[in-house]
Amino acid sequence: MADIARSIEAQPLTADAWVPFGWLPVADTDPADGAHRLTFEWDDVHLNVISHAPQEIVHTAHGLLCDAMYRHDTHTQALLTLDVLSVIAVAPSDVDFAGSGDLDAVRVFLLRPLDSFVLHRGTWHWGPFPLGDRPVTLYNVQGLRYAEDNAKVDLAERALAVEVLVPT
């Protein structure tokens, strides 16, 4: 297992806390509806259902190990958690993970079934990953060619792995 540079507690997903990373969809009757737009630079918007299993990640004594982050520079990504409690770690797009001070910008959010959110283009993210023994299923809107636009930073290689502390 990678050395842990920092432990971060999962916090509730709220619109205010999510602002640096994207936005939370609102009801069509909300005056803020339409204030944000999805962006797909390659005009390849795609809808599917994806999942992440607990076996995809390392589990620690107190939570989960975030040892890498990913981002998409050509499109936003919209997700809806469908079934189980999960967590997502995020950082703003301007973070370059050059040193431990960059971990100050990382946040972890607890996601409940039917929570929906949008990631800004370039937002670093890890997950969502489930908290239990079942995979998390996600309704996913992102670029069809996301694999061509899937930058990765290896946090473990840089000695910047984050332990995601989960509620008990």
Image: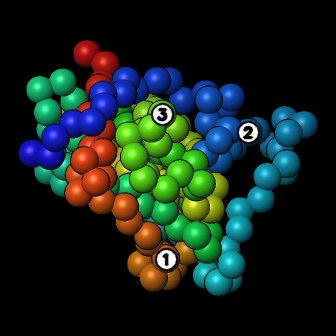
Q: Earlier in the sequence, mark 2 or mark 1?
A: 2
Q: Residue at 38% x, 40% y: name it.
A: 100
Upstream in sequence: badge 3 or badge 2? 2
Residue 75 percent location from the top left of the image:
62, 69
Q: Secondary structure at mark 2?
A: loop
Residue 104 sits above or below residue 76 on the image: above
Three-letter code for the amino acid on which mark 2 is drawn? Val
Considering the numbered disc 1 on the image, is that residue within a helix, a strand or a loop? loop
78 left or right, relative to 164: right
* Quarter containing the N terminus: top left
Spatial separation of the CA atoms under disc 3 and disc 1: 25 Å
Q: Between marks 3 and 2, how big is the CA–CA gap?
A: 28 Å
Query: Residue 26 got which mark?
Result: 2
Question: Residues at badges 3 and 1 in contact (C-beta under 8 Å)?
Answer: no
Q: State the image quarter where residue 101 is shown.
A: top left
Left or right of 62, for residue 79: right
- Residue at (49% x, 56% y) in the render: 96
For the residue marked with disc 1, what is the amino acid?
Asp
Residue mark closest to the camera, 3 vs 2: 3
| The C terminus sits in image quarter | top left
* CA distance separating discs 2 and 1: 28 Å
- The residue under the point 43% across, 70% down is 151
Check disc 1 and report the residue beneath it. 149
Taking 66 as reference, is 111 left or right?
right
The residue tagged 3 is 104
Q: Secondary structure at mark 3?
A: helix
Q: Is residue 110 visible?
A: yes
Image height check: is 147 above or below 83? below
